[in-house]
Every structure is written in C-alpha cells, then in structure tokens.
C-alpha cells in the first residue's frame, strides 16, 4: 500500500550496481529501511539522484509500506527542504553527521514519534541557517534536549550551590559524586545554560571556548553511554572536536 510521509535520511549503503539501501527516520512510520532501485544511474538530464539520499537530507517520499516486511521500497521522492549550507559547509556538515549518528544509536524501534521527527527536522533546518557561534554550540543543544523523547533528560540545577553534574544520575548536585563521571565548575554552568535554552537562535548567547566544548561533548557521550544500553563510542565525535576547535 502506498503512503506519503517525510523522511530524514540516516544512512545509505550501495546495493548491487545501481541501487541503495537507505535507513530513514520517517514522520509516519518511525525508523525504516528502504530499497531505492536504479538510483545510482545517470539520467538523460545529467547527474545521479543518489545525492538526495545523503545523511541528514529531508525528503518527501511515497513509499510502499508492509508491516510484515523489514525492507520497504521508495516509489517517489523529492527534497522537502533544500539546504543552503549544511551539506557544503564543513563545520555544519560535521554537526549534522554527529546529530545523525546520535539518532542512529538512540532510535532502535520502528514506532512513529511525530514530535521527535519534528524536533530533528526543525533542528537540522535551524543548523542550516545558524551563525558560526550557534553552529559551534549546536551539538550541545541537540544532545542535551533530545533525551526528553527517550525518557532520560537531565534535570537542571535547582539551587546555585549545585556545582557538579552527575552524568550517571543526570542530576546537578552540591556534593562531588563518588565516581569519575561528572562535570563541574564552568562546564556545569554551561550545560545548565544550554538546558534552559528552548530556541536554537538563543545559542548566540552561550560563550564557550573550544576546550570547554570538547570536555562537555565528552561528558555528553558518557551520559548517553550510561543511559542507553550498548551505546558505545561515537565515530563522529573526534572529527567534531577537531573541527570545532
């Protein structure tokens, strides 16, 4: 049966001579895998349409969907949003790939979640339009806010003397945790600031140096590993740390 939905591309893998197997997060069906036949051939008008399926692309698609199958098919597709900078700007692309990998590690079931889909879509569009300061802070904003959709969002500090952020518990505390997985001082202040930000454009107000961002990103990786079984380490994080430095 044919359905229309939006899709955010998470990964695409070559299949055979001309096809792709695509992993996408869709508005209507959640996480899905699709076969896209004949996409890597060059059309008479010139060029291949495989570029539509780059990670982080936002598409309008018409799909065949059968709940009994693990691999669906895409019949039609077109860009739902045309990026102006995200896929050509090395900094924004690195952030987008970090966001995509984070979602790949977190989303494991096919159930639809329109609120999560719209959050990811909105974040990618804002990233495309972001200033350099907003772009540098965007990985923190995304990674600190998206856990609300998975049930383990950090609790912000409730008093000014809570100088430690316990990454295992996801709470701020006045006492140093009795384990090494915590953030403290100015880095904890920065996390608290970003947790209070609801609109990406307000990231312009977050003043951080590259060393602080690197430490916080490492802490965020630890935080996710504590809360998601089998999370492991992120391949995009070393690249992101280097680029944003």
Image (tube, rainbow, N blue to C red):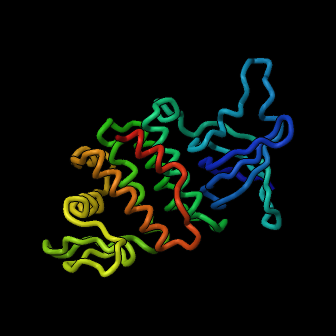
Q: Residue at x 82, y 40 (%)?
A: 37
Q: Residue at x 46, y 73 (%)?
A: 226
Residue 51 figure quarter? top right
139 left or right of 109 in image: left
Rendered location of residue 228, percent (x, y): 52, 71
- The answer to whether any part of residue 71 appears in the image is yes
Q: Name above or below for residue 82 compared with residue 63.
A: above
Q: Name above or below for residue 37 compared with residue 234.
A: above
Q: Name above or below for residue 171 compared with residue 31.
A: below
Name the outermost residue toward the right.
16
Residue 38 figure quarter? top right
Residue 41 figure quarter? top right
Q: Residue at x 24, y 58 (%)?
A: 190
Q: Quadrant of the N terminus?
A: bottom right
Q: Quadrant of the C terminus?
A: top left
Q: Name above or below for residue 99 compared with residue 150.
A: above
60 left or right of 90 in image: right
Name the outermost residue toward the top.
45
Rendered location of residue 151, percent (x, y): 46, 74
Rendered location of residue 162, percent (x, y): 19, 74
| Viewer-nearest residue: 182 or 111 | 182
């Amino acid at each position: 049966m044919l359905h229309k939905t939006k899709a955010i591309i998470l990964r695409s893998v070559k299949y055979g001579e001309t096809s792709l197997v695509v992993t996408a997060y869709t508005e209507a069906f959640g996480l899905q895998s699709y076969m896209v036949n004949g996409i890597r051939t060059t059309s008479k008008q010139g060029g291949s349409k495989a570029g539509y399926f780059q990670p982080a692309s936002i598409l309008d698609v018409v799909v065949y969907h059968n709940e009994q199958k693990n691999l669906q098919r895409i019949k039609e597709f077109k860009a739902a949003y045309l990026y102006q900078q995200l896929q050509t700007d090395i900094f924004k692309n690195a952030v987008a790939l970090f966001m995509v990998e984070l979602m790949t590690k977190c989303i494991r079931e096919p159930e639809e979640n329109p609120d999560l889909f719209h959050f990811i879509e909105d974040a990618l569009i804002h990233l495309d339009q972001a200033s350099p300061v907003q772009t540098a802070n965007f990985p923190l904003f995304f990674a600190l806010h998206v856990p609300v959709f998975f049930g383990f969002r950090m609790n912000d500090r409730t008093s000014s003397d809570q100088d430690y952020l316990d990454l295992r518990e996801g709470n701020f505390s006045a006492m140093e945790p009795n384990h090494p997985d915590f953030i403290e001082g100015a880095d904890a202040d920065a996390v608290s600031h970003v947790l209070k930000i609801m609109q990406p454009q307000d990231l312009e107000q977050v003043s951080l140096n590259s060393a602080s961002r690197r430490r916080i990103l490492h802490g965020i990786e630890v935080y996710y590993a504590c809360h998601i079984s089998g999370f492991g380490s992120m391949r995009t994080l070393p690249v992101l740390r280097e680029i944003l430095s």
